[in-house]
Amino acid sequence: MKKICINMSNLHNGGAVQVATSFLREIVNLKNFFDSKDITILISTEVKINLSHSLQDIKSVYKIVELDVFGLGALLPSKRVIFSNFELIFTLFGPDYLPFIKSKKIVGFAQPWIIYNNTVLYQRLGFFSSIKTRLGFWIKKQFFKTADVYVVELEHVKNGMLSKGLGSKENIHIAYNCISRSYIELDNTLLYSGSLSKKKFTIGLISRNYFHKNICIIPEVKAVLLHKYGKDIDFCVTFNETEFNSHSDFFQQNVINLGPKSVDDCLDTYLSFDAVIFPSLLECFSATPLEALASCRVLFASDMPFNRDVCGEYAYYFNPLDPNDAAEVISKYIDDKWGRDLEERLAARMYAIKFSSPVDRALIYVDVINKVSL
């Protein structure tokens, strides 16, 4: 039996942990699809925590090892010896930092900084930080080049990789990102309130405090809504204490911090919002827009190709560099549609559910593993 490693030891936050959790919950029922292979799954502490009650079910089918690897820490001899025992390593999201390992390697790619030159973000970083960031992602690119096969989440990522000399048309596979099963199975009656106009409008974002998410625009949007349109709206984020305190006093005074949310807490958090704002400037694929739509939340999203490719007609788009434009879009929605758009929201929910499914994604991962291990 070939020894296969599914590596999630390097995933510690953000959407990658959500994907890992969803994938592991799906493959409990896919043991027979692995063609009698000896599967070991390395999970980080954060993935383990988010699996919660599902962990025992997964352990009953696969060998689970808790291991935390941080970046270049994979180069340490104590870590390399663990990975050297496998004939194939599938790292859900790379880079894996495992050069010169004899194993075949499949690596998930979700690094938009490598495939897109976002001038605005680099200008915001400043000269020295920009150089440091470019160097850091150049180094990551070199480690990505050591993979035998790649898995990405959308066609534009594959095209971007090819334009940067990463991979080939034959060794880059697409496994569409999707919402977790909990969003699909939720009772529609829990998704929509008929008395929205009786309470304060709340807009939220479930995200880590990543620079490219452009979250700094949120308090500016709030200020325009209040002073130009007379609308006092609550904006919420889900940062840890350090992330929240890193922002200005203006940000902290105008944005409510709900604290970090586990994967299982995200759905209830979405349901506590009336709408979701997603002002990101750079993505390969984020599940946040689909999760918002699947939760019947109104989605205000940056007018960027990666959002339009995923959300189509089901989001309200704004210029992510202009808080006045974002405020105008939000204000117009509240005036024209708030509390009167049930059919539109339910149509968006069905679109998000049908975009892709957790089991479809899991089957693609398993298929790639089987093909590469031949």
Image (cartoon, rainbow, N blue to C red):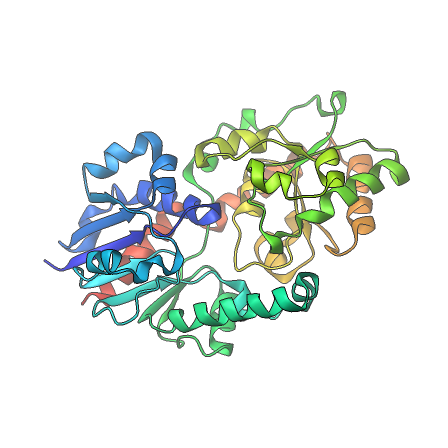
Q: Is residue 267 left or right of residue 181?
A: right
Let me know if residue 87 appears in the view: yes
Q: Residue at x 46, y 34 (%)?
A: 262
The residue lying toward the viewer, choosing from 76 and 304, is: 76
- Quarter where residue 297 is shown: top right
Quarter of the rendering occupied by the N terminus: bottom left
Q: Is residue 213 left or right of residue 255?
A: left
Q: Position of residue 362 (x, y in %)?
A: 33, 51
Q: Residue at x 57, y 36 (%)?
A: 241
Q: Residue at x 75, y 56 (%)?
A: 319
Residue lying at the far left in this picture: please name it: 1
The answer to whether 364 is drawn above or below residue 252 in the figure is: below
Q: Position of residue 79 (x, y in %)?
A: 26, 56
Q: Position of residue 223 (x, y in %)?
A: 82, 40
The residue lying toward the viewer, choosing from 333 and 135, is: 135
Q: Residue at x 46, y 45 (%)?
A: 13
Let me know if residue 239 appears in the view: no
Quarter of the rendering occupied by the C terminus: bottom left
Q: Position of residue 198 (x, y in %)?
A: 75, 20
The answer to whether 151 is drawn above or below residue 300 in the figure is: below
Q: How many marks?
A: 0
